[in-house]
Amino acid sequence: MIGLDTALGEITLVLFTTLAPAGAMALLLMGLPILSGRASWAEVRRISTYLCLPLIVAMVGLVASATHLGSPANALYVFAAVGSSPLSNEVLCAVVFLMLGGLYWLYSFHRAPSPRLLRLWIGAIDLAALAFIASVGLAYSARTIISWNLWEVPAAIAANALMGGPLVALAGYAAGRCASLTNRRARHLIALAAIALTANVAVYGLQGVDLGNMGNAVASATDLVPAYGAAVAAFALLGAAGIVVAWRTTRNLPTDGTPPADAGRFRLVGRLCAAAALSLAAIFVMRFCFYLAHLTVGLGV
Amino acid sequence: MAQLAFYFDGTRCTGCKTCVFACKDKNNLDVGMAYRRVWEYTGGTTEKGADGTCTTSCFSYYTSVSCNHCDKPICMANCPQGAISKDDETGLMAVDADSCIGCGTCANACPYAAPKVDPETVKAVRCDGCADLVAAGELPACVMACPARALKFGDAEAMAALGERGATAPLPDPAETEPNYFMTPTADARAAGSSEGFIGNPLEVA
C-alpha cells in the first residue's frame, strides 16, 4: 500500500489526534456541573479531582505526538511561527489547554480553594478546549495537500471529540463516584455521542466521495486508501458498540446520582472505560485512514 | 545577486540520472535518499489495425526536479519552527538543523516532494542549490554533471528567458508555489494535471 509508510510514520500523530480532542471534550463536559454552579461543594471537589482522567487522555495524546519528533528539545521554536503555521497554532492551543487544566487540577487540592475561582477557571479551560479542538482540525489545512485541505477534516475532528468525549466523561464521573452521574445526565451524554457518531459517518461518507475524485501523477486517493469504505463501516460498528455498552451500563443508574456500592462501582467504571475505548478505537481507524490518504498536488504522497 | 533558478531542457534530457547521482555524491546521500529525482511520465497505447499495421499513441519523457526554491514556498509557510529560510540574496532555501524538530510538515506540504526527513538524524533535508558551490562562483553539482547539458542554473530572469515556468505533467500547476524552475518541454509533454499518463519509474523516485 503506497501511503502505508506515511501513516505508520505518523502513528503517534494518529494517536494524538484520536486521544487529545476526545480528552479535551471530556474535560469540558465533565466540568459543566461546576461551570453551571449547580453542583454541591463536595461534588465540585470530587469532579475536580477526577478531571485528571480526561486530562490524562489528552496528555497521553500530546506526549505521543512529541515522540515522533527527532529533536523535541528544540520545540520551543514552535512559538516563533504562531499565526503563520497552523501547526504552531495547534501546539500553542495544546499547551494553553493542558497548562490551564493541569494547574486547575493541582489547585483543586488546595485546602480551601475559591469556588468562584474554580468556576471561572473551568470556564477558561472550556474555551481553551474548544480552541484546541478547532486548532487540531485546522492543523492540516495546507492548500497543496488536496486530500487534507477539505472541510470534512475539521468537521470530523470536531465530531470525533463529541463522540469520544462524552464516553470518557462518563467513565470519569463513574471513577470519581460523582453524584453528577445521574441517569438523566448519562442519557444526555450518550445521546450526544450517538448524534456525533451519526454526523461523523455522514461526514466520512462525503469525504469518501471527495477522495474518490482525487489524485495526482503518482497515485489516486483510492490507491492510497483502498479499504476506505470498510474503514468507515468499522468506524460505525466500533462507535455504535461503544454507545451500546455505555447505554446498557448506565440505563439502570439511579436518578438522584447515588453512587453504587464499591463492588458495582468497579464494574461500572470498567464497562464505561471499555465503552470509551471502543469509541476511541473507532476514531483511531479513521485517523489512520486520514494519514494514509496524504496526497499533494503534483508529486507528493 | 537576484533570485536564482534552475532551467531544464526537456528536449535534451535522456533520463540518464547523472544529475541524481552527482547530487547524491556531492551531498553524500545514502541509498533511499535523493534531493534530485528524474520523473518518467509515460502513457498511451499501441493498437494493431485490421490491415495488420500498428499505430501507437505512446509517449514517455523525463523531468529532472529538486527543490525549486519557490517564490511562494509552502514548506516555509507551514514550518511550525520557522526552521526553513529563503536567502535574501539568492532566494535559495535552507533548513536550520538546530531548530528543525523533524516533524515532516515541509515534506508533507511540498507539491514537488522536495524536502525529506532524514531517518537517521530525524531532521528535514533538501536541495540547497549547492549554496556553497554557488558562493564560490561554481554551479550546482547536478548542473555541472549533466552530460546532455539539459540543466542550467542562474538568475531567475535569465532562466525565464530560456523557457516557461515548469507546468508540464507530472509537475503541479506552478501557480501553487511559483517555482523558480523554468523549462523547455518535449514535444510529447502533457500539461500539469493531465491524467493521460502515469509515473513510469515509481521505484526510482520513491
Image: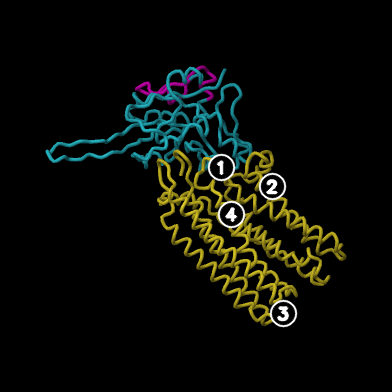
Q: Provide the chain ID for the residue under circle 4.
A: A
Which chain appears yellow?
A
Tally the marks.
Answer: 4
Name the element at disc 3. loop
Q: How far apart are marks 4 and 2 (CA)?
A: 21 Å
Q: How packed is label 1: few (under 14 Cα within 10 Å), some, or many (20 or more)?
A: many
Pointer 4 residue: A155
Residue A66, percent from left and from top: 61, 50
**What colour is chain B?**
cyan
Residue at mark 3: chain? A
Segment tinted magenta in the rendering: B131-153
Which label is found at residue A142? 1
User: Badge 2 local density, few (<14 within 10 Å), some, or many (20+)?
Assistant: some
Task: Tell me the number on the disc at residue A205.
Answer: none
Amino acid type at mark 2: Leu
- Marks 4/1 same chain: yes
Q: Which amino acid does label 4 sit on?
A: Ala
Q: How far apart are marks 4 and 1 (CA)?
A: 16 Å
Mark 1 vs mark 2, foreground winner is 1
